[in-house]
Each structure stands twice: as C-alpha cells, then as structure tokens.
Image (spheres, grey):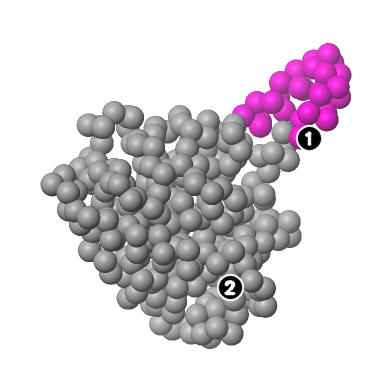
Amino acid sequence: MSVGKVVLALDGMGGDHAPEVRRRRQSSMWLAVDAAAQGRADTVVSAGNTGALLAISMMAMRMLPGAHRPALASFMPTSRGETVMLDLGANLECDAENLAEFAVMGSVFAQVLLGLSAPTVGLLNVGSEELKGHEELRQAALWLRREGSPVSFQGFVEGNDIGTGKVDVVVTDGFTGNVALKTIEGTAKLYTSFVREAFRTSTFAKIGALFASGALVKMRKRVDPRRYNGGVFVGLDGVCVKSHGGTDALGFAYAIGMAIDMVRYDYKSKLVEGLARLHALPPTLEAPVLQAGGGGT
C-alpha cells in the first residue's frame, strides 16, 4: 500500500485543552487531524500538546469498530530487541474491557511495526501469580486466555520484566504506563551521567574511555531516544502519531516513518479484524462476553 500524504501539525495547545479544541479550529493541529480524518491525508504527525491532540483526534477521527477508548502506544529497547508498551497516558483508569482491547491493539501494533507474526502479550501487574492485582486485571487475563483469543497471551509480567523483553507487548492503564515510561527514561539518563562521571575520575579512566569509544557509540545509538520517538493513538479510525516536542530532525523522521508504516501495512483493517475476534469470543462462567461497541466518540 502506498502512502501519499503525511500532514505535520507544528503548533500546540497548552493549559485546559477542551476550550481550545472548540476555539482553535483553524490551528495547524486541528486542520492536520481533520485532513487525515477526511481522507485528504493518509496520516498526521504532531508535536503539540498530548491532551489537545487526543481530544481533537477523538472528535475528528472517532473510534474504530470494536474499540471503546484509544491508547497511546510506543516501543522501547530491551535486552531481546524491542517491546511495545501501552497505554502510556491516554487513560488514567481502565476496566477489564479496555485492557483486553489494548492487548489486541498492542499485538497488531507489534505485528505491523516490529514484523512479529505472533507477538507475545503480558499484563503489567504487581506479581506474576494469577491471584495478584486488582479485579480488572484478573478479569482481563481471563478474557485473553480464552480459546480463540486473537493475542498470544502470556499472563502477568512485572516492572522488571519490561527491560528484559520477557514479552513483546506490555499492557497497562495509562497512569501506570506513563509512570513506568518516565521512570525508565529517568533511569537511562541517570545511568548515562554515571558513566560520563566515571570516565572523568582519573587519567587512566580517560584513556579507557578512548579505547571504549567505539563500544560507547554503539550503546548510545542503541538507546538513542530519537529512534523511539513517536507514540501512536491506537484505536482511532485514522493514524495519529504524537512526536516529542523537544526532538530534532532525526527524531521527527522516525516519527514520520512510524506513521507511514502504520498506513503502508494496513494497521487499521488488521486491528478491526482482531477486535472483532476478541468480541466474538464465547463467554465463560469466569469471563462474561465483552460488549462489542466503539465507533463513537
């Protein structure tokens, strides 16, 4: 599938974004999202305010059939490669139905962007045991374990499993996901500062840094945040990518590339198919049937 047009929204909206959404219908953010929603563009990439972009996208694009809420998804480096994580902040609270749908969204996201045929999926929890966690997590796990599930569900994972790449997709609510993401980013910066300080402690350390420069460059490229710039609002009837506002040209290029791949490899139709399979699963005594829906605001 060819991609014709990618629209960039360059301005942002600060503060309480709800009134801004109504007042600033001529902003580049609104016009860009509307162009993608109306088919005048294939996808939109914005570095504006995340809340405003989400609100505008939900109003203009609406939801895909079978999806009730959008989730912010992205991927990060791990010891095994890369792992997709969602939700990263679009929904502070989620019920079991939301989490089950996010699992399908993340699975299809990993298929499209990471080229995985059957990505493994885990729910982020305080322990891997089946009785751990709140009721919504346990109920979502029961739904995802049913025969015919559209995802390869591996059960619960813990925070320290994210970096090891234990599963290809980590699913959680937006509050927990955003805290986990910021913690990972902060830890990476702290580790980098420790390494720099260590190589400045003595003449021998500086000489060692020269010998290790090649390896350090490889490590820097491996964890370069610009390579992972861009979070996608999955579940919308359109492709909308949120870029970090402080990134440079390379970071924007990666975000645009992500948007293009989402369209090129037909993410939307694959997600609709996966969500339909999820909602068609027969109910059990432990896990009642999900209510098919979505497609609205």
Q: Nearer the viewer, residue 95 or 285?
A: 285
- Disc 1: CA contacts within 10 A as few (<14), some (14-19) or many (>=20): few
Q: Residue 53's spot in the image, x, y percent?
A: 48, 69
Instruction: Tell me which residue sits at (66%, 39%) in the image.
Output: 223
> On screen, 225 above or below 49?
above
Please say if the residues under marks 1 and 2 sit with CB atoms less than 8 Å apart: no
- Report if residue 37 lies within the magenta region: no
**Is residue 225 in sight in this rendering?**
yes
> On screen, 65 above or below 289?
below
Instruction: Tell me which residue sits at (62%, 29%) in the image.
Output: 191
Instruction: Tell me which residue sits at (30%, 47%) in the image.
Output: 147
Secondary structure of residue under mark 2: strand
> Disc 1 marks which amino acid?
Val
Q: Residue 214's spot in the image, x, y percent?
A: 83, 30
Secondary structure of residue under mark 1: helix
Q: Which picture quadrant has residue 180?
A: top left
Q: What residue did someone put label 2 on?
A: 43
- Disc 2: CA contacts within 10 A as few (<14), some (14-19) or many (>=20): many
Select label 1 or label 2 by which is in front. Answer: 2
* Left or right relative to 26: residue 175: left
Could you tell me what secondary structure mostly forms the magenta stretch? helix
Mark 1 or 2 closer to N-term? 2
The outermost residue toward the front is 148
Position of the C terminus, as image quadrant, is: bottom left
Give the Cα separation between the discs numbered 1 and 2. 33 Å
**Is residue 124 in sight in this rendering?**
no
Position of the N terminus, as image quadrant, is: bottom right
- Report if residue 213 lies within the magenta region: yes
Q: Residue 274's spot in the image, x, y percent?
A: 40, 60
The span shown in magenta is 191-218
> Disc 2 marks which amino acid?
Thr
Q: What residue did someone put label 1 on?
A: 217
